[in-house]
Amino acid sequence: ASRPPHRSRLMTFETDSKAIVERIKSLINEGAPLSHAVKKQFGYTFKEEQDAEGWLTSAAHIVELIIRDPTNAYRMKCLSLVASSQVKIGRREGVTKEHVGSMIGVLENLMRDIDAGLIASLADRVRAEVFDEFLDHAEAYHKEGRKESGVIAGVVFEDTMRRIAQKHRADDPKIDTIITNLVKKDVFTEVKAKRARAAADVRTKATHARWSEFDLSDVQTCIGFTRELIANHLD
């Protein structure tokens, strides 16, 4: 089976998330000398005004990278600050130390939310999107009557299970042990555990090309169950 596209999006997001956090910290430090807390009653020089404009743009950009929803409170606040900073007052641009100070407040609160798990939550959303695309690929193969669809479905199922296990500290190299751990933690019921083991069985047989040991209907069940897991635990 050909490799489904876009898996690199997940790896890129997870690699970049640490860099994003470091960039936010850097922006907070860079913005401090331009904020009202430091400038107090003093206005900007021409150079400081240019620096403030560039800084405000960078700060808004980093928020947009993290939060894609345009109706999110952080995104809307950034948009408001950038828009008001571009209003001309006389012959000067309207960016002020108050704009920078307010944006620093946005970044500081965003960092608190990141520390509380925002990045992990966003990573789960990216996973959900990537996994869903893989399952679409598996379903396309399934409709063609190709049992290779079981390989793709099985890989997505296993990756989904391992992410759920990480979230609930139920990790283990063996999928069956992960299922047992999730039951113990009341994440899975016994009924769901039974369905998970059936999906794991399809994954094992498909991965080892034991085509005669499972049917296309088993693959469809695995796909459906995996979509359910993604919707309930990652999306």
Image (cartoon, rainbow, N blue to C red):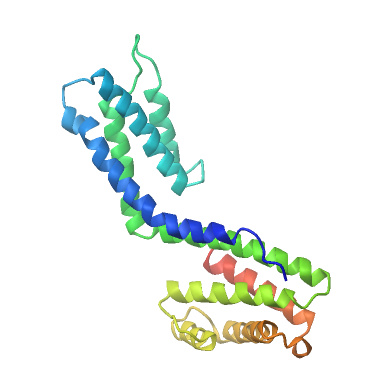
Count of numbered circles on the image: 0
Of all residues, the one furthest to the bottom in this rendering is: 213
Residue 200 seen: yes
> In the rendered view of the protein, which quadrant contains the N terminus?
bottom right
Image-quadrant location for residue 137: bottom right
Residue 77 seen: no
Using the image, determine if residue 227 lies above or below residue 25: below
Q: Residue at x 68, y 87 (%)?
A: 205
Towards the viewer: 230 or 17: 17
Of all residues, the one furthest to the top in this rendering is: 90
Residue 90 lies, in percent from the top left, at 34, 9
Q: Residue at x 41, y 43 (%)?
A: 62
On the rendered structure, is 41 left or right of 212? left
Using the image, determine if residue 106 lies above or below residue 202: above
Q: Residue at x 71, y 77 (%)?
A: 150
On the rendered structure, is 107 left or right of 154? left
Using the image, determine if residue 36 lies above or below residue 16: above
Residue 221 lies, in percent from the top left, at 71, 78
Q: Residue at x 46, y 85 (%)?
A: 181
Residue 73 lies, in percent from the top left, at 43, 42
Of all residues, the one furthest to the front in this rendering is: 2
Residue 36 lies, in percent from the top left, at 21, 29
> In the rendered view of the protein, which quadrant contains the C terminus?
bottom right
Image-quadrant location for residue 166: bottom left
